[in-house]
Image (cartoon, rainbow, N blue to C red):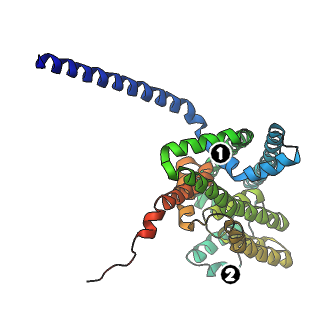
Amino acid sequence: MNTSNDSASDKSHLDRALEVALRLAFIALIVFWCSKIVTPFFLPVLWGLVIATALYPVFLKLKKMVGGRDKVAGAIFILVSLALVIGPTVWLADSVIDGASKLGKGLQDGTLVVPPPSDSVKEWPLVGESLHESWTRASSNMEAAIARHADQLRALGSSMIGGVAAMGGAVMQTIFALIIAGIFMINAVGGGRVAYAFADKMGGEKGRELVDVSIATVRSVVKGVLLVAIIQALMAAAGLVFAGVPAAGFWAFLVMIVAIIQLPPILILGPLAAYVFSANDSTTVSVIFLIWSLVVSGADGFLKPLFLGRGVAVPMLIILIGAIGGMIAAGVIGLFLGAVILSIGYKLTEAWLGDSLKNEDPSVESE
């Protein structure tokens, strides 16, 4: 009798286990196919979510101006943001293409002239002597200099072509992200409910606090890092145009990248200032550009406290690792996203460990 009951119980457990396994397999299959379908749109959607979170206060002001109409405010946001992105992109592309065309024509016709370097170039640390020698050789005999460095120039050309293609892809992703951000903002109320409900399920009592920390971190990093870098790039672009530096848009873009990864823009603007001193006939213009370059490089000293002071402070090392790692993992768009995502992870970890860290005794007993 007991044997019969045990057999029935075992069969019941087996049936339940099989049923659970089939359900889990079905859920795994659905998740797998959903991830495959969503993967091509993952970066634009994530980038759009970051933009929407960071600029939602601006959207609320715009919504108030149009009488509380969400769709009208969203449409205006999308149109204005696209204009702000597409305009500089066209200028940047035109600047790069124009500079490349002039360089190619000069090389082809033999009319490309490189001004000789000043003696101060020799004093640059590490690369001064070799750079001065190569620069002098190029200024006196361009064809021989090109032949001497043909392999390096070929590799540099391939890298530049790849970089321009990556920039184009990043711009397209940003355009899609801005449209997605506008849609997120229009549906922000429902999206907020979903976010808090999901946080309640995943984080319990701390769930809502973690959502608030994430929002504050996104806004802080976007304002204190990305916005500062964009301002420095625009300032650099104004100076480059004033000094008549070729491909000003391209150099301004490099300034923005350097600023995002928390390096001083003078790394880009310094050599360009030396070029202006060598190529420009006006000493006044050269001096003004050098001073302006120093101002641009030091602008983050007061811009970052101004913007970061209103949000959540994040260690610069976290932003540096996030920006570089993001760029390696996801290209140019990852440069922006990486800093934001890793900062969110840092602040969430800090919030999660907050009570434990406060209760932990930091003193270490010595033997």
Which one is in front, 172 or 133?
172
Where residue 72 sits, quadrant-wise, is top right
Percent coordinates x, y for residue 39 in the rendering: 55, 35
Q: Is residue 106 above or below residue 367?
A: above
Q: Is residue 297 above or below residue 207?
A: below
Residue type at tag 1 = Leu
Residue at the spot of label 1: 49
As drawn, is 83 to the left or to the right of 119?
Answer: right
Question: Which quadrant would the C terminus be assigned to in this image?
Answer: bottom left
For marks 2 and 1 on the same chain, the one whose residue lies earlier in the sequence: 1
Q: Residue furthest front?
A: 1
Mark 1 Cα shell of 10 Å, populated few (<14), some (14-19), many (≥20): many
Whether residue 250 is visible: yes
Percent coordinates x, y for residue 113 in the rendering: 76, 64
Percent coordinates x, y for residue 120 in the rendering: 68, 81
Q: Residue at x 70, y 47 (%)?
A: 52
Q: Residue furthest right?
A: 66
| Cα distance in 3D space between marks 2 and 1 | 48 Å
Q: Is residue 279 above or below residue 169?
A: below
**Element type at mark 1:** helix
Residue type at tag 2 = Ser
Mark sitting on residue 100? none
Whether residue 94 is visible: no
Percent coordinates x, y for residue 317 in the rendering: 53, 66
Residue at the spot of label 2: 120
Which one is in front, 5 or 54?
5
As drawn, is 291 to the left or to the right of 323?
Answer: right
